[in-house]
Amino acid sequence: MSVALLFLGCSGPTIDDRRPWTPPAVSGVLLPVDEPPVELVWEGDAVLGSDADVASFRRWTRITGDLVVEGTALTEVSLPSLQEVGGEVRLWENPALAALDLGALRSVGRDLSLYDDPELDALVGLGSLEEVGGSLVINRMPALVDLDGLQALERVGARLYLFHLEGLRTLDGLEGLREVAGPVQLWEDHALVDATFPALTTIGAALDLFDARSLVTLSLPELTDAQALELHHCDAMRDAGDFPRLTTLTGRLMVQWNPVMRSLDGLGTLTTVGSLHLEALPALASTAALSSLSEVTGDLTVLDADALVTLELPALVRAGLVDARYDDGLLDPGLEALVLAAGLRFEHDPALSACAVEALFDRVAAPLVSCVDVDDDGCAAVCVP
């Protein structure tokens, strides 16, 4: 019968030791090759720089420290027995790496990060991964078109950061993700068309999209808990997405520099936000989709939204500073239900009726901060035309 060796009492190289590793002298228990050990633990960090290094770790089931593959000429990393890494997994700057097999890996204690591995076009080698204790960071991986292979992933313990993934078109592969304890940041993913998280219920900080210039669909049908939502430079989005179960944002709702966004459809269940900031939205014709919004605890700001003719927020009762500036098409401040605000500011809104502003000021318990450069339609008690 052929045999394999189970090494006991071994310790690994430090994270700074980049020399090829040679297995220690044989000592331990003989096992049949076709009966892999239940658990073979490597104490410390594993830094793999060569095919020999990778081969020497093929039987280990757990690494207590970090797994690092950085700046190598490796074309493949195959560790089919590895089930757990207690520290971080770092795969950085491996220009030839085209195949990854960590098919048994279920959990990573800290961050899992992939950075600048230009030939790696699939994550199917992570098919058993259920939890990342720290952040999941995928950064400058141009060959990825989706995230297929991460279907088992349910929880990320810090942030989910997908940055500058030039080929990424969908988030297919994240169907099982239910919780991200930190922010979800999708930045500079220029080819991304569909950002759907079908099972995600909790985001511990902001959902933040920046320079997603091809994005058409943003859908989080199960999301109930998030601190903030920010949509910046989403050049193809015509509405704010789909959030049918989201009622509260303790932080800000910020929508800015989205040139074709015509409505805020998808946010109709929101009742409370920490602040509301709408800026540089030349096609935004209505805010009426925020039909349930009753309180903005901080400032309500509308800047450079020239297609708006009124601020239609039918349920809004309370707000901080109401600040509308440089809105060339604004005729009436609206806000028919508003009874309490920290202040009112209307500046450089040339079509805005001074009489309508005065009526709002008379109705709402709020100090007038400023009313300048509006339409002089016969009322000058509070506004300076």
Image (cartoon, rainbow, N blue to C red):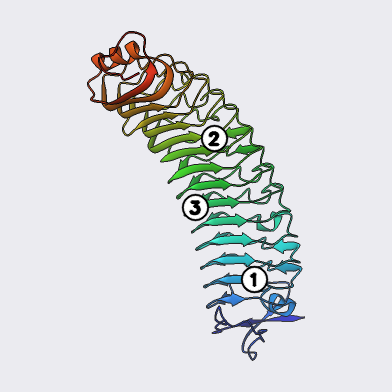
* Residue type marked 1: Val
Give above or below for 153 relative to 232: below
Which residue occupies the foreground of this view, 76 or 234? Answer: 234
For the N terminus, the quadrant is bottom right
- The nearer-to-camera label among 1 and 2 is 2
Viewer-side residue, 178 vs 97: 97
Can you see residue 38?
A: no
- Count of numbered tags: 3
Q: Nearer the viewer, residue 253 or 197?
A: 253
Q: Residue at x 69, y 78 (%)?
A: 53
State the image coordinates of residue 260 (x, y, percent, origin top left): 60, 27
Question: Looking at the figure, which quarter contains the C terminus?
Answer: top left
Q: Mark 3 vs mark 2: which is more N-terminal? A: 3
Give x and y (percent) for residue 377: 36, 9
Report the amino acid beneath label 3. Answer: Arg
Nearer to me, 191 or 241: 191
- In the structure shown, which secondary structural element does the residue marked by tag 3 occupy? loop
Q: Using the image, tell me which numbered label, if any, was put on residue 159.
A: 3
| Camera-side mark, 3 or 2 | 2
Which numbered circle lies on residue 69? 1
Q: Is residue 105 left or right of residue 65?
A: right
Amino acid under disc 2: Trp
Instruction: State which quadrant residue 332 falls in.
Output: top left
User: Is tag 1's residue or tag 2's residue first in the polypeptide sequence?
Assistant: 1
| Res. 141 in view | yes
Position of 17 with respect to 191 (left or right) is left
Q: Confirm or deny contact between disc 1 and disc 2 (CB under 8 A).
A: no
Q: Position of residue 20 (x, y in %)?
A: 67, 84
| Label 2 packing within 10 angstroms: few (<14), some (14-19), many (20+) | many
Compared to 382, does 8 lie above or below?
Answer: below
Instruction: Say few, some or many: other residues with alpha carbon within 10 Å of mark 3 (under 14 / 14 to 19 / 20 or more).
Output: many
Q: Which residue is mark 2?
A: 257
